[in-house]
Amino acid sequence: MSSQTETIEALFEGAARLASETLEENRAGRGPVVRRLSPEELGRALELELPAEGRGLECVLELAAKTLRYSVQTGHTRFTNQLFGGADPAAIVGEWIAALSNTSMYTFEAAPVGTLVELALLDKLNDFVGFSEGEGVFAPGGSISNLMCVLAARQRAFPHIKREGLRPEDRPVMFVSEESHYSLERAGLVAGIGTDGTVLVAVDEVGRMRPEELERSIASERAKGRTPFFVAATAGTTVAGAFDPIADIADVTESQGLWLHIDGSYGASALLSRRQRGLLAGCDRADSMTWNPHKMMGVPISSSATLMRTKGSLEETLGMHADYLFHGNSDNAYDLGDRSLQCGRRVDALKLWFSWQVQGDRGFEERIDALFGQAARFRELMEERPGFRLIREQEGTNVCFRYLHREKRGAEGSERDLHEHAATLAIRAQLAEEGSFLVNYASLDGAATFRFVAANPETGDEDLTALLEAIEAAD
Amino acid sequence: MSSQTETIEALFEGAARLASETLEENRAGRGPVVRRLSPEELGRALELELPAEGRGLECVLELAAKTLRYSVQTGHTRFTNQLFGGADPAAIVGEWIAALSNTSMYTFEAAPVGTLVELALLDKLNDFVGFSEGEGVFAPGGSISNLMCVLAARQRAFPHIKREGLRPEDRPVMFVSEESHYSLERAGLVAGIGTDGTVLVAVDEVGRMRPEELERSIASERAKGRTPFFVAATAGTTVAGAFDPIADIADVTESQGLWLHIDGSYGASALLSRRQRGLLAGCDRADSMTWNPHKMMGVPISSSATLMRTKGSLEETLGMHADYLFHGNSDNAYDLGDRSLQCGRRVDALKLWFSWQVQGDRGFEERIDALFGQAARFRELMEERPGFRLIREQEGTNVCFRYLHREKRGAEGSERDLHEHAATLAIRAQLAEEGSFLVNYASLDGAATFRFVAANPETGDEDLTALLEAIEAAD
């Protein structure tokens, strides 16, 4: 065995040990959620200067340890800041193997295992959606998946567009809810129709798109001479976690002949739970869906399925048939490259495959139920404590709330909102600074609002209570 | 220590062992490059059925071993099929840590280490390009980077486009070489100008864009009333590995006031070598560049830098300023989210940082020189052997060639091309079937042509000779 071989063995073993330790600490909720440093301080703590002379493999474990020390511990039970959390050891190993076997998903030839695994996963996800003749492809995140679906809708409505581009008379217009993710509006921008080409449809008091407003907007745009071509319903909005009423929206899109997309980046995983799947009732009537297993299902970023109800539309929209890649032999039916906006593409499917074998449908269902249960429990715990106020009636895994200290509680209306706004910013910053909790905030109904996300099923009652107490105790 | 903790420890240790063994085998060139199975056979060998009941963490190492067994061994010294190869242990550990610490690059707050590391790397790459006031962002591959640059150029030329979309009078047209990567033409399609909106400029006998043809095409498009806005020069074309004459093209784009992009997905890494950087002379005059460290620099997929000569244009093009993410505090100057076409985004920068600390500028320079040297050596070895014919005078890391068995060597002109075409397909398929070598082919100058890529510096003279002998010995 050469000395380099020994060095590599020791390196990989060391990395595995570091990984076990980190996971164990975070699962036990030990240590801070984050060690906050300013960019300048952190810059001094890291080796950011890229040297002319290499330092050899010996420096890697030190870099790895530093990286972990100063990273946000997203696997920590008190990290509730993003739409993802926890750490799935099977999926982590899936990523390791993907990095090690390093290949690219354009062809079955280059990625035989990745291709078959991705196809099996797409079939499985499509089964849950109800796309019985569907297809799809993985993408590096919900924004890119959403973009691909906007492009597929554009292609169907304006078949000349792939070759000719937009014609002056096309005047496309698309519709999303005013609480939808910004990637949809930006997809319109990318597609050449500008942000003016997207109509933001009003939502109801819990943040769901109003189908009657959608219908009205479509009529109004048609009256202006524009051509509606795409409607996105959101399953799980980013801030409030609301589920748009898909069946009612599908009634509108079907009667109007429009493409219905579901941005389920966040909430499509509710389909895995028999108790929760009703939130997406009617989703099988959509033309496309985005579903991110890297959110509620807990695999590492990125895992984003772009799902289509019918076969062929992705290739029709994006396929360029490069002959240096696609050799026209019998295995080419399996090549995924012409369905994708990428050329080289990581094997993102592997981690989800590993995780699915380990957890099974039932394991994922338990996870989803646990997350919904955790959010409901957090709301319950909050109701017992004065000063906390839920913003919106919510049913999902997000809890949007504000808090006021005793002396400010007399205020009402916009004065109360102002106090709550200031308190949210101050308390949230203090918790993050201490590293005790990371919980995000966003502007909701006119003022800054805490947004707690149940994303890690290992977060327990004691964590939830501790968060409420920490908020009460903050200066 | 809980039993689950022990299970995870054993799992990670087992994965590390598997990784060491795989790397060692491939570096030594032991074992086949690929164990080819048909999709049906491979489907039976893998566990593609996703079970209702989970199988527990115990199944993971078995899945990992199966994955590695049936994957193409891209780290093998006889894998020369794609524009990447080899396996960098430091970068692999970088990917492991990125998967473990699982966060997203939208904000400094969520990814403090990843953000500073990415910024440091972008500065370093920009230094090599000569973008002294530049900026950039990592993207999941060259296709997405190229798309972002097309969009930035579109935004500069048609400032109304972000809000209003394309106006009928805009009539944009872009220019790339006829041997450029298909992602550029497709970027135009995505941007709403259709494949007709891209002019394919003729190349010279080695595959370089002809600047005088570019100039002529621009004039001709202007005469038709269209508005040129974007020119892409390619540094390292996909098949022939040609470097377009950047300085001459920059003369044209500067005099015409057009955006100059360099698609250096493949070849920008030549800048790391003092001997080779002349291939990109004039690149500091470009407006943007795509550079993929996951190709010549050997880090795992994806690593794609989108580099811009001036600050602000990515955000101007793509920024949506979502308030739930970007909180307007002092660290927000570091937030990269509004420069990206993604929202959630993997920490791709980590692996390159690890690798750069280990190798330094000098290590990368040696690697690049070794790859160029390997390709030159392969051409030399080929010249000594009758029946081999180089297609194109090449200077890069690709070697395009054809071979004829003795009995067919009398043919000339198109008859010879036909024989060579058939031989390329047959021999290439046989080597792949045996698993002895994986070397790609593409259509070049009218017939199928082997495309050997020097991508793994550990590929030695004995591998090169063995490849030539295997081609001679094929039926």
Image (tube, coloured by chain):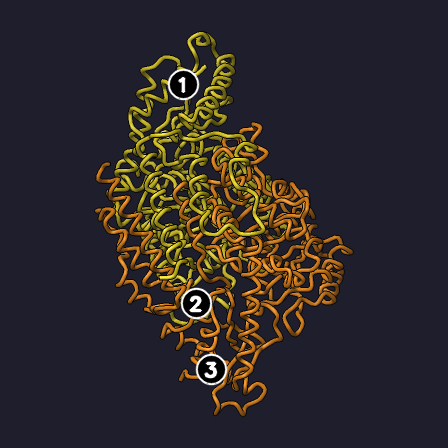
Chain colours: A orange, B yellow
Whether residue B247 is visible to the viewer of this picture, yes or no, is: no
The quadrant in which the N terminus of chain A is found is top left
Q: Which mark is residue A423?
A: 3
Task: Give the image location of residue A286, x and y in percent.
Answer: 69, 53
| Nearest the eye: B343 or A32 | A32
Residues at marks 1 and 2 on the same chain: no
Q: Secondary structure at mark 3?
A: helix
Q: CA distance from mark 1 to mark 3?
A: 73 Å
Residue that carries the numbered disc 1 in the rendered image: B471
Residue that carries the numbered disc 2 in the rendered image: A77
Q: Which mark is first along the chain, 2 or 3?
A: 2
Residues at marks 1 and 3 on the same chain: no
Q: CA distance from mark 3 to mark 2?
A: 24 Å
| Nearest the eye: A284 or B241 | A284
Task: Give the image location of residue B19, x and y in percent.
Answer: 35, 43
Q: Secondary structure at mark 2?
A: loop
Q: Which mark is residue A188?
A: none
Which tag is nearer the camera, tag 1 or tag 2?
Answer: 2
A297 above or below B322?
A: above
Amino acid type assigned to the residue bearing label 2 in the image: Thr
A263 above or below B426?
A: below
Residues at marks 3 and 2 on the same chain: yes
Residue at image position (54%, 90%) is: A411
Residue at image position (65%, 53%) is: A129
Amino acid type assigned to the residue bearing label 3 in the image: Ala
Amino acid type assigned to the residue bearing label 1 in the image: Ile
Give the crowd class for mark 3: few <14, some 14-19, many >=20 residues within 10 Å: many
